[in-house]
Amino acid sequence: MKRFTAILARITIPVFLLLIFIPFIWSLPGVHGINLSRFEDMEKRAPNEYPALPSDRQELAAFPGAFEKAFNDHFGFRRDLITIFKLFKYNVFNQSTDPNNVVVGKDGWLYLGNDYFRTFDRHTGSRPPLEGEVDRLITAEKKKRQWLARRGIKYLFAAAPNKYSIYPEYLPAYVRSADNTVLLDLVAEKARKEGLHFIDLRPFLKEAKELHGTLAYAKTDSHWSNLGAFYGYKALVEKLSEQTGPLKTLSLNDFEQSIGKAYNLEGLLGMRKFHKLKDVKIRLDFDHSSPEMKACEFSGKKIGWDQYNEVHYNSMLFIDNEQALNRLSIFMLRDSFTNRLSPLLNQTFTRMAYTHYNRPELPGNIVDFLLTFKPQVLLHEMVEVNLAGVTGVYPPWETRQSPRRKQRFSGLNSAPRSVNAALRTNRTQMNGTSPSLPPTPGLCFSEST
């Protein structure tokens, strides 16, 4: 027994030292490179690089701090060790390692944290709506409506609900939902008084919840599911028909459930590599099929497209579908909630154009985009949490741009403006191709495509 203990001690000590020193050696400059894409996916930032050897007193003073930051980022097996720690804390204590990013609720439900316009505090009431938030948003919407009305473009503004608003019962036990009015309540009331075309989608998602239980939103995602998006879609089209006249909508024949990998909040927890979390996947089946669609980027580059494809929130795309249910052209300002709406909209309207309302090149170019595409409707979808991030009025709803704002966007606008100029040049060849619709931009969908 003593001999066995001695042998075990001789083995344990070098193994222990090896485990300590391997990550240290792995961390030294030039020994092992860092996987940049994996690091940025997990940390949401670029890694600190090792500084050059100091050449003066000032660089010497800054060298230790800079070296420590780089050493920490390049520490051997850093990503794996962090992921193991996060998995341990989540599985053993049901806690998030970064609650400001992701809040861990009951039964595997995940929610956005305060890093997103303090959405957690807004739900609990510890961060009530600030004075001026509602008026600033409504003022921007009124100017937008007026600008569009002068150009004969109909307008609808839709607010998609936070996950908090539909499934508060799965929040942690210590959370108490606010009894007071939330920002969306105030926006909806003010929009009604001002006569704006606005729709609050919360009642329709609550209807989906009553009919389908927990399937309206994904447990490990901040967004609605494909099924929840369908209820939002039906409400949007019906509300839009108040301005356009009767519109046809897709009918839901059936939907299938399957268990698959978790969604985006798992990635924000830093556990994507191990895929320990599972979530329900939903596939919808409709009574209408549009297999032949055409798509191109705003740059004019044509891309392949399928009727089930989602338009990613960072894409700027035109979609053309001659087999759609309604001959209507729509320009859509959107965020990530439109991802799962887009396959439904693409089968419902003949022409769609999509862009995120926060793209940096948008303010200086949206006039060109709208005048080129000539939509009959501008549809603006915004998730509830982003209502707090509206900064005010931006072009083209202002009649003139200040020289400073013009200068700010001049560099970003050069390529898109050249594309739009080309689109306007080619517009004349499209006249008459669809009498009931404005002409589609020629670079995307000419008769020869």
Image (spheres, rainbow, N blue to C red):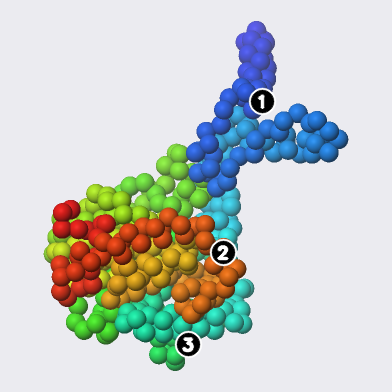
Q: Is residue 32 visible?
A: yes
Task: Give how far apart the Cα atoms at labels 3 and 1 are.
Answer: 59 Å
Tell which tag, 2 or 3, sits nearer the viewer: 2
- Secondary structure of the residue carrying tag 1 is loop
Q: Where's residue 263, x and y in %?
A: 40, 51
Write down the quadrant of residue 132 in the picture: bottom right
Q: Is residue 307 visible?
A: no
Residue bearing the label numbered 1: 28
Amino acid under label 2? Gln
> Could you tell me which residue is drawn at 43 percent across and 52 percent down?
264
Residue bearing the label numbered 3: 190
Q: Which of marks 2 and 3 is nearer the N terminus?
A: 3
- Secondary structure of the residue carrying tag 2 is helix
Q: Do the residues labelled 3 and 1 touch (CB within 8 Å)?
A: no
Residue bearing the label numbered 2: 407
The N terminus lies in which quarter of the figure? top right
Q: Earlier in the sequence, mark 3 or mark 1?
A: 1
> Could you tell me which residue is drawn at 57 percent across and 73 percent down?
402
Q: Where's residue 260, x and y in %?
A: 33, 47
> Could you tell me which residue is drawn at 63 percent across and 32 percent down?
75
Task: Give how far apart the Cα atoms at labels 2 and 3 are.
Answer: 35 Å
Amino acid under label 1? Leu
> Could you tell me which residue is drawn at 61 percent across and 39 percent down?
47
Q: Residue furthest right?
A: 57
Say whether residue 402 is left or right of residue 325. right
Q: Where's residue 10, x and y in %?
A: 66, 12
Estimate how packed mark 3 is, as few (under 14), some (14 to 19) or many (20 or more) residues with alpha carbons within 10 Å. Answer: some
Amino acid under label 3? Lys
Q: Which of marks 1 and 2 is nearer the N terminus?
A: 1
